[in-house]
Structure formats: C-alpha cells, structure tokens
C-alpha cells in the first residue's frame, strides 16, 4: 500500500537562526521541511517533481531572492514561492504586515515570533 505524499516546504535563507526557526515552525504543523543557506545549494539537491513550496529570503548574499526566482522560472522549475506576487502585494507591503504581526506578538525577530508560536501551541486550550 502506498503512503500519501508528504508536502515539503523548502526554506532558503542565509541566516541560520531564521532558517532553523522557520524549519521548526513548519515541522511543528506536521509538514516536512528542508533548509538551505543558498539558492545554489537548493539547486544541487534537484528537488524537482515533489509536492512542495519554497520560502525564499529576498536578501540573499550572492543571488537575491527575486533573481533566484527568475532563474527558477527560466529553467521551468515550477514551485510556489512568495505569495505576495500572487495577491498583487509589494515586498514592502509584506514587510509592513510582518512588522505589524511581530509588534502585536511582541517579537523582536522572526526567531522570537516562532518561539511565541511554539508557546501558544504548547499552551493548554481553554
């Protein structure tokens, strides 16, 4: 009997702490996560054909997130990235919403935000 395919969330971010925090958050909701420090590292693993999406840092050191996204499109690697373009929002708008969420959750960084989310997940429900 075949098992159901498990979705994978690929994370590309040069900041180890952010990468690990997102990785842990994704796995905490039952999804598989794989993390990479660069787009080139991701490409070397040849992850084509799997049910997946990509969380991509906009500011990568060698090839920026948007440039990497263009490279993927040019090579016909179809993988969902960065919902902002799908809904017509700019990167600045996404940053504003992320900042508002972090402010409301009293988180100083994405790592702190994941820690807050973990605490909420572990808290008993009333």
Image: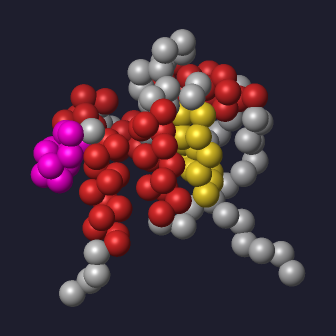
| Horizontal arrangement in the rendering, residue 85 relative to residue 12 (left or right) | left
Q: Quadrant of residue 1?
A: bottom right
- Closest to the observer: 34 or 87? 34
| Horizontal arrangement in the rendering, residue 18 relative to residue 8 (left or right) | left
Residue 53 in the image: x percent, y percent? 57, 47
- Closest to the observer: 74 or 92? 92
Residue 100 in view in this figure: yes
Task: Determine the main secondary structure of the stretch shown in magenta.
Answer: helix
Residue furthest bottom as drawn: 126
Residue 124 in the image: x percent, y percent? 28, 81
| Horizontal arrangement in the rendering, residue 93 relative to residue 60 (left or right) | left
On-image quarter of the C terminus: bottom left
Magenta span has 72?
no
Residue 100 in the image: x percent, y percent? 15, 44
Q: Which colour scheme is used?
A: secondary structure
The span shown in magenta is 97-108
Residue furthest right as drawn: 1
Residue 120 in the image: x percent, y percent? 28, 67
- Residue under the image location 48 percent in, 33 percent down: 16
Residue 97 in view in this figure: no
- Does residue 38 sit above or below 119 in this rendering? above
| Horizontal arrangement in the rendering, residue 96 relative to residue 36 (left or right) | left
- Closest to the observer: 125 or 71? 125
Label count reads: 0
Magenta span has 105?
yes
- Residue under the image location 67 percent in, 27 percent down: 41
- Residue under the image location 56 percent in, 61 percent down: 31
């Amino acid at each position: 009997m075949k098992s159901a395919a498990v979705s994978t969330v690929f994370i590309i971010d040069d900041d180890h702490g952010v990468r690990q925090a997102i990785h842990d958050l994704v796995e905490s909701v039952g999804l598989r996560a794989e993390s990479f420090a660069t787009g080139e590292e991701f490409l070397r693993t040849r992850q084509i054909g799997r049910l997946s999406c990509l969380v991509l840092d906009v500011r990568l050191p060698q090839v920026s997130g948007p440039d990497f996204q263009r490279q993927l499109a040019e090579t016909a690697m179809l993988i969902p990235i960065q919902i902002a373009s799908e809904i017509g929002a700019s990167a600045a708008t996404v940053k504003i919403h992320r900042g508002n969420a972090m402010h409301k959750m009293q988180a100083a960084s994405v790592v702190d935000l994941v820690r807050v989310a973990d605490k909420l997940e572990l808290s008993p429900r009333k």
